[in-house]
Amino acid sequence: MYVPEHLKWRILIARILKSFYFENENSSRNLKRVFESFGRYLLGTTYDTFLGYLNKEKYDLSDLKLPSFIVTALGLLDDLRITCDHLHARKPNASWTPVEIVEELLAVVRERAKKSPNRKIHID
């Protein structure tokens, strides 16, 4: 089966999103949450297509790896969401400078590191 290069990247991103943000407690609801929070915007697909990307039998991409900077950025998506929520609460409907965003992101990452010191971003 021919799979274009851009589709391979989308499949790998879907799988990384699942590995970072999926929780086993309620698998169907958690997959939907991962898709609604990140997959819809990053992949531009439907939920059914997102689920298809996760099917390792259909798409065997075990020989491909995403660059480490993309994996790291995907691991920080939840921190970025929290950062934007904090900034929006302080200055609704305002534009923020990159410096403000980075300072708030560092504060969020430090705060989350204190709560769970073993949290790591896995780079394959």
Image (spheres, rainbow, N blue to C red):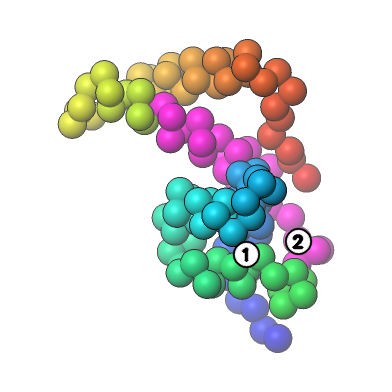
Q: In the image, is 37 to the left or to the right of 21?
A: left
Q: Position of residue 24 (x, y in %)?
A: 69, 48
Residue 57 visible in the current orientation = yes
**CA separation in Å, label 1 and label 2:** 11 Å
- Please, what secondary structure does the residue beneath circle 2 have? loop
Q: Quadrant of residue 5?
A: bottom right
Mark 2 Cα shell of 10 Å, populated few (<14), some (14-19), many (≥20): few
Main SS of the magenta segment?
helix
Q: Quadrant of residue 93?
A: top left
Judging by the rendered image, the residue that carries numbered circle 1 is 11
Q: Position of residue 11 (x, y in %)?
A: 62, 64
Of the residues shown, which amino acid type is indicated by label 2? Answer: Leu
From this view, report whether residue 31 is shown above or below residue 4: above
Q: In the image, is 75 to the left or to the right of 94?
A: right
Judging by the rendered image, the residue that carries numbered circle 2 is 64
Q: Position of residue 80 (x, y in %)?
A: 46, 33
- Please, what secondary structure does the residue beneath circle 1 have? helix
Which of marks 2 and 1 precedes in the sequence? 1
Q: Position of residue 37 (x, y in %)?
A: 45, 48
What residue lies at 57% left-to-right and 51% top-to-bottom?
30
What residue lies at 77% left-to-right and 75% top-to-bottom?
57
From this view, report whether residue 113 is shown above or below residue 39: above
Of the residues shown, which amino acid type is indicated by label 1? Answer: Ile
Q: Quadrant of residue 123?
A: top right
What residue lies at 28% left-to-right and 27% top-to-bottom?
88
Total marks shown come to 2
Q: Please identify, in this view, whether the residue under mark 1 or under mark 2 is nearer the observer.
A: 1
Q: Residue furthest front?
A: 26
Q: Tell me where the magenta segment starts and ends, as one range.
A: 61-83
What residue lies at 75% left-to-right and 61% top-to-bottom?
64
Q: Quadrant of the N terminus?
A: bottom right
Viewer-proximal residue among 28 and 59: 28
